[in-house]
Image (cartoon, coloured by chain):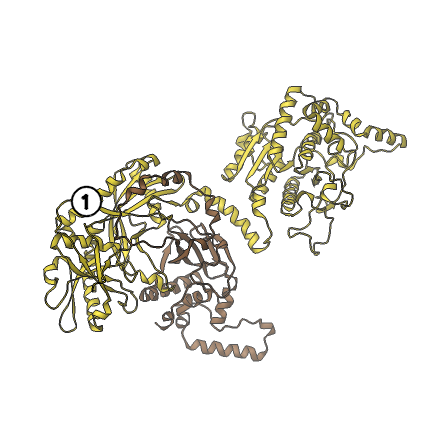
Chain colours: A yellow, B brown
Amino acid sequence: MDNKTVLQFQSLSSLVDPTFWYSLTKEKIDNIKLSDVPLDIYGYYSYNSLQSSKSNDNIKVPSFLQLNSNSLTNEIIPSFSFPMKGLLKNTNTIEDFQKLDKKGLFEKVSKKIWDSILNGEAIKCPSLLNQFLLISFSDLKKYKYYYWFAFPALLLENPIYLTNTQLLSDYLNKNELQSLHENYQKLLEIPDNIKKGIPGYFLLKKDDNNHVKVGTLSEWEMFKSDDKNKTIVGFADPCVLPNNPGWLIRNLIVLLKKKWNVSKVTILCYREIAGEYADLSQCKLMDIEISGEELSDNLPKSVGWEKNIKGQFGPRLANLGPTMDPNKLIESAVDLNLKLMRWRIMPSLDLEKISSTKCLLLGAGTLGSYVARSLMAWGIRHITFVDNGTISYSNPVRQPLYEFQDCLNGGKPKAETAAESLKRIFPGIHSKGYKFTIPMPGHSEDKNVIKTNVELLEKLIEEHDAIFLLMDSRESRWLPTVIGASKGKIVINAALGFDSYLVMRHGAKDIDDNSLPTNHGSKLGCYFCNDIVAPVDSLKDRTLDQQCTVTRPGLSAIASANAVELLISIINSPDGINSKADASSSPFEKTPTPLGLIPHQIRGFLTHFNNLLVVGQKFAQCTACSKIILEEYQKNGVEFVQKIVSTPDYLEQLTGLDNLHKEGELLNCDWVDDDDDDIDSI
Amino acid sequence: MVHVSIKNQYITYEEFKEFSQNFLRKSKILNYQWEWIEEPKNKKGFLKLIQYSEISKDKLNRHELLEDDDEIYNIIINKNEYNEIQLKDEGVLTEDSNDIKIFWEWHIVYSSVFQVPTLFFNAWDEEHNPIDILNNRDIFPIKPLNTPIITQKDHPILGIPYYYIHPCTTGQNMNKLYNIEMKDQLTCSMQEVDTIGKKENSLKDLSNDDIYNNYIASWLSTTGFLKVDIKYFLL
């Protein structure tokens, strides 16, 4: 028996069920409030640990101290488990947590354990040997819990040596094992025994006639070794390792040394596998040597801080935000819904790309409202509104982001109110509103105001990936078309007539490559390419019905939905903005991308409940996206815009449209009567 | 009394609850720690089991978690005093910290749409950080032979996202288990109708209670994610 080794104990691992944090949160809000007086809490450990590995083989289950929703209030103890009493010090701020006298608290608990040994209380109530410490800071707003456990184990001067290990079933025969189990059950059945932890630490002794007696620590004198038997001290052991006992025997060994100056003893690691028949095959007997002098009454040193998940000494963090924070819950629900689409139907759906697309909505009216809602449904997190208007009494029923209250006292500004409304619907959204007027050809304005607004619009377009043109006039679309084309952004345009609409994407930046097909994204026109008049003040001289929104009420939702779906198809297409424009095909034909066709223009007719897909090329003399305009804008910027605002005819001069008109007049053709005229406003 | 129609693989919630109680009773005898959890608000319950497993840290794909770095935690974790907080002690067993502890939370929830039990689950580490299952499909304690479609879905009772196995084939599987042939009556020949009739008769000899005694355990064995002790069927 000379091959003695230092006996090493398996540390306890804390296992906190989220329900513990839920109840702590509730208790904190309802009762504890700002008090940070230490609280008594109760955890438990099981000596039936192997059961969890029963259903999956070869797992080393650690020794767990478990906390759950009952840990704060009472001592409901699950079967095959014993209680551990703990001291919870929860601080109100992270600073307090940092400043906490951790060593002091640890020593306080150690001293409680030591005192219970000195005054003999631990013999009557052995659960006093297991007291632990929990320090925490609960961030109740974010549902984050910073915590640290300590399981103080008193230290002896010298290490404890292990001299022999054997299976209990090699020491006791079958009948004796059964007798042990029966007598152990009797110990468990005595009322209050479990609460006091009495069966957690017990004594046993072989008797005659294949019996094994089981006793409590108070019965030490009856159970200690005699000429026939050695002293065996049992403890309910959550550890499952073959050569190491669990942490919970440590303070008992100190008790044995202090109370009875024990120097040699056998410990029984009681590891029952419960079930139809109790299985004691995993129980171990370990002969140990506790060397050294008799102990004084001075508090011994102790160890027992728990390591965190990184394997270092330090606090742990339980982040329950994802399961408790309503803001996090709605975010994950939004994503989940979209992911379902990917899992079930379209594996190629690039949700990350979609949700990271930043959208700028120019116009926060009927179209702006519906577009924003559809974008949110696609998981888009950045939506910015620009609108110069305020909410009027006619708006709420048609514009789903506004309510009656918003119209009062002259009406709230549309853009900001729309942004607030989005945040109310979904707090995870990043939304802002800007109230200003987009400079328009023919709408004369102070030069400084134009400068400020052009620069702001440039900045906003620069910061976003997709620009939606959702205004109620044709000429307000001109400047964003120019800037969008110049910066190479995705521009989606939606315009309403009374019962018809147009939804289109603007063509990408021109690539000088004649080998590209005519429907290549870079060959496609913008909203102004089909016009052969420069935008002028279309609101002037109009009758009332032309100036306001006179459209069939369902039209805007249809057009908006199409505009958003068009954007999503572009984003999800590998060619993005350069995707070829598809023409109409039968709904039964295969489509080139999983999401379907990527048209250039959708012209919808509510009268016939019909959509037409139209492809239109870039017009070399376009007043918005032609080379000459873009070059002029890039060269002269704000000054150029200022000039156009005051003299819109300059656009026609620049592009040579005026010559075209003259030729047209010579031919006596009526060019001005373009179909587009009844489609552009709203 | 069980009201399951023997022609029908579907069960009602009341039947689910009854079968669950039977399953729980046996689980207790066999030392499997299934619990019945009931939500007080809607009085609907489900079965729950916590399971534990370990996996090497390098085998776990955790990229989603890194984004959620907590600033406060990073500040408080890096304190020098912590290095000295613990005295040196030979008596502490040093264990391999390269393993990560994973807790599996298995729920058997009744699906009112499919009218069969459904398996919901989540996996957490020790600090209750969720494990991203979709990027870690190899870490299940037991791998089913045919990996079913796993998606995420709001738990019908708890209202928070859980992974789940879609129950679309459960009905058919249970049919096979109970030897129920669900043939389209129109294409059935007279002979086939006859054999179905005979089967019904032979099943009728047993009371419904006996046949469906192990409904939950039988169903659970078809999922392939949890070992179902044969003793459930012998008790």
Q: Is residue A284 above or below residue A580?
A: below
Q: Quadrant of the N terminus of chain A?
A: bottom left
Q: Nearer the viewer, residue A128 or B213?
A: A128
- Residue A418 figure quarter: top right
Q: Give the residue number, with chain letter if any, for mark 1.
A: A111
- Residue A102 figure quarter: top left
Q: x and y percent of residue A490 in the render? A: 66, 39
Query: Residue B49 vs residue A217: left or right?
Result: right
The answer to whether residue A602 shows anywhere in this view is: no
Q: Nearer the viewer, residue A157 or B182?
A: A157
Query: Residue A94 vs residue A411: left or right?
Result: left
Q: x and y percent of residue A95 in the render? A: 34, 34
- Residue A414 figure quarter: top right
Q: Quadrant of the C terminus of chain A?
A: top right
Numbered label tally:
1
The answer to whether residue A259 shows anywhere in this view is: yes
Q: Nearer the viewer, residue A175 or A325?
A: A175
Q: x and y percent of residue A517 in the render? A: 76, 46
Q: Residues within 10 Å of mark 1 (few under 14, many from 20)?
A: some
Query: Residue A366 vs residue A300: left or right?
Result: right
Query: Residue A298 vs residue A76: left or right?
Result: left
Q: x and y percent of residue A65 in the render? A: 29, 52
The residue shown at (56%, 38%) is A382
Q: For mark 1, give the secondary structure.
A: helix
Which chain is mark 1 on?
A
Which amino acid type is shown beneath numbered disc 1? Lys
